[in-house]
Image: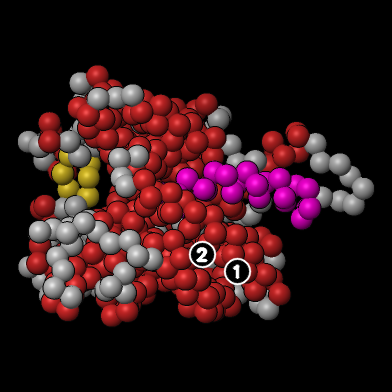
């Protein structure tokens, strides 16, 4: 998928017909091809082509793994269309739009969930089918492959993060450097504290505590799943953690930008970095950064008589988030070693390189490879080539949202409410609540202040 998108650099728009889901009020405008080259193509045709393309690719994989291709196609067809309906529903304007976009869609309220609401809807529908229509869930079993779907999504994410990092090289050097320092500082504090609290006071096993600590500390969905793979956790564990991350990110999105406007309108870059450190999903963090940018610039103009250039606070948010995303691969490698050596290692036994290799989540290598490949291509590219590279990466990245949605839906199919209650879902949410509002938000604020205090955007005048 990535290599086909990469052909855009050579002037070949091979996968520009891939369907993109837009935030919509009129359902006829919900779907469109990702590339303007195919803008005359109806959205529904783009969706059908996307379904055929993904089904063919996955069927080749199923055949290579010795699976039943016919049963896979039959099951995947149902899974794909239900999932995509959920993904599209999550982009309905009154569900997804954030306050900074109200004027664009001519509305004055929404649930403010961002398009990532589609993940939660897919999980809920999957849970309903898995628990109340078990016969259908069994029929879909051959195509219920959440680990495969999510690993595909994370590998594709590597290209997008590489593109972000490449674009960051043109930003103010001090913001990039301070963002990196802030992430290292925060990470060394966040993860151990969350893990300790989950284990010591809420009695969670390492299987639950580690993905929870990564989900809260790094970047929600991707970090929790990479951690789950590194420690060989059951698939349900990181996805349930990811669901909590998305839900709490929405709560943060509703509160933190307005707190930042009230407290930090004299320290705009602190506010921007704080959104990147505190809000744990890419979509919600970017929305929070955009809201902070608009809210603080408006208040500074009236309260301080200063007009700052647009986008600098959002830049601080996205810079911090880029470094967080880059850290996923490094942390998965570290945890794979720790789990093989300490957590599950037996006293007196030596841990060999082969043991670590067996445990190591191989898909993280794909993530790292795409990240490095994008950096390598883009580092010596002209401005026009860089623009084409960004478009190609964007086309491939369109698949990522679809695969994440497929992951959430199929995890729902595999789960049942009774087991979730037994695992302590209420306690899990309580750990998240205590850690997030007890110290993570405030440590993030302190670190943002330490590294970005006194830096202001250029004047717009």
Q: Give the residue pinned by disc 2.
A: 216
- Neighbour class for label 2 at 10 Å: few (<14), some, many (≥20)? many
Residue 208: in sight, yes or no? no
Q: Position of residue 238 (x, y in %)?
A: 54, 58
Taking the spot 22% from the left edge, 29% from the top edge, the residue there is: 383
Q: Are marks 2 and 1 in contact (CB under 8 Å)?
A: yes
Residue 83 screen position, x and y as percent: 34, 53
Q: Looking at the image, tell me whether mark 2 or mark 1 is earlier in sequence order.
A: 1
Dominant SS type (magenta):
helix
Q: Position of residue 266 (x, y in %)?
A: 28, 73
Q: Which label number is shown at residue 175?
A: none
**Residue sitting at 53 percent across and 62 percent down?**
186
What secondary structure is marked by label 2? helix
Taking depth in this image into account, of 202 and 299 the one nearest to the observer is 299
**Magenta stretch?**
321-344
* Residue furthest top as drawn: 10
Residue shown at 64% from the left, 64% from the top: 192
Q: Is residue 347 left or right of residue 80?
A: right
- Quadrant of the rendered image containing residue 20: top left
Residue 368 located within the stretch drawn in magenta: no
Residue 203 or 450: which is nearer the viewer?
A: 450
Please give the label number shown on residue 194: 1
SS for callout 1: helix
Q: Is residue 14 left or right of residue 221?
A: left
Direction from residue 383 to residue 58 in the image, left or right: right
- State the residue in front, 397 or 416: 397
Q: Is residue 341 magenta?
A: yes
Asked if residue 40 can be seen in this view, the reply is yes
Asked if residue 438 lies left or right of residue 338, the reply is left
Q: Is residue 58 above or below residue 333?
A: above
Cα distance between the residues tagged 2 and 1 = 8 Å
Please tell me whether residue 142 is drawn above or below residue 451 in the rendered image: above
């Amino acid at each position: 998928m990535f290599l086909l998108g990469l052909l855009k650099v050579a002037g070949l728009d091979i996968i520009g017909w891939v369907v993109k889901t837009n935030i919509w009020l009129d359902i006829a405008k919900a779907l469109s091809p990702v590339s303007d080259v195919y803008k005359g193509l109806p959205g529904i045709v783009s969706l059908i082509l996307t379904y055929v393309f993904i089904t063919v690719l996955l069927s080749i994989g199923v055949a290579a793994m010795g699976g039943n291709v016919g049963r896979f196609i039959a099951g995947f067809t149902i899974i794909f269309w239900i999932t995509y309906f959920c993904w599209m529903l999550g982009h309905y304007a009154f569900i997804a739009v954030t306050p900074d976009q109200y004027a664009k869609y001519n509305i004055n309220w929404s649930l403010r969930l961002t398009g990532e609401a589609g993940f939660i809807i897919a999980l809920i529908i999957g849970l309903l089918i898995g628990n109340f229509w078990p016969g259908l869930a069994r029929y879909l079993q051959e195509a219920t492959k959440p680990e495969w779907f999510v690993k595909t999504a994370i590998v594709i994410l590597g290209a997008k993060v590489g593109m972000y990092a490449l674009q960051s090289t043109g930003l103010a050097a001090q913001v990039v450097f301070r963002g990196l320092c802030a992430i290292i500082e925060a990470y060394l504090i966040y993860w151990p504290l969350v893990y300790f609290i989950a284990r010591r006071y809420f009695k969670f096993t390492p299987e639950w505590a580690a993905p929870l600590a990564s989900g809260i500390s790094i970047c929600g969905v991707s970090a929790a799943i990479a951690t789950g793979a590194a420690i060989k956790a059951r698939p349900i564990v990181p996805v349930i953690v990811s669901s909590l991350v998305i839900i709490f990110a929405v709560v943060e999105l509703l509160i933190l930008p307005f707190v930042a406007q009230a407290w930090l309108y004299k320290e705009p870059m602190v506010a921007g970095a704080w959104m990147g450190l505190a809000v744990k999903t890419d979509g919600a963090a970017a929305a929070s950064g955009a809201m902070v940018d608009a809210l603080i610039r408006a208040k500074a103009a009236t309260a301080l008589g200063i007009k700052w250039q647009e986008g600098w606070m959002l830049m601080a948010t996205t810079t911090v988030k880029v470094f967080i995303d880059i850290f996923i691969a490094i942390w998965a490698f570290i945890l794979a070693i720790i789990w093989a050596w300490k957590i599950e290692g037996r006293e007196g036994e030596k841990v060999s390189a082969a043991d670590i290799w067996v445990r190591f989540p191989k898909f993280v290598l794909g993530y790292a490879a795409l990240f490095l490949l994008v950096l390598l291509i883009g580092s010596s590219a002209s401005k026009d080539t860089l623009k084409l590279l960004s478009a190609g990466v964007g086309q491939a990245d369109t698949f990522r949202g679809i695969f994440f949605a497929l992951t959430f839906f199929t995890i729902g199919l595999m789960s049942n409410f009774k087991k979730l209650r037994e695992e302590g879902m209420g306690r899990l949410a309580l750990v998240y609540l205590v850690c997030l509002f007890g110290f993570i938000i405030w440590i993030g604020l302190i670190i943002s202040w330490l590294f970005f205090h006194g830096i202001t955007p250029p004047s717009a005048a």
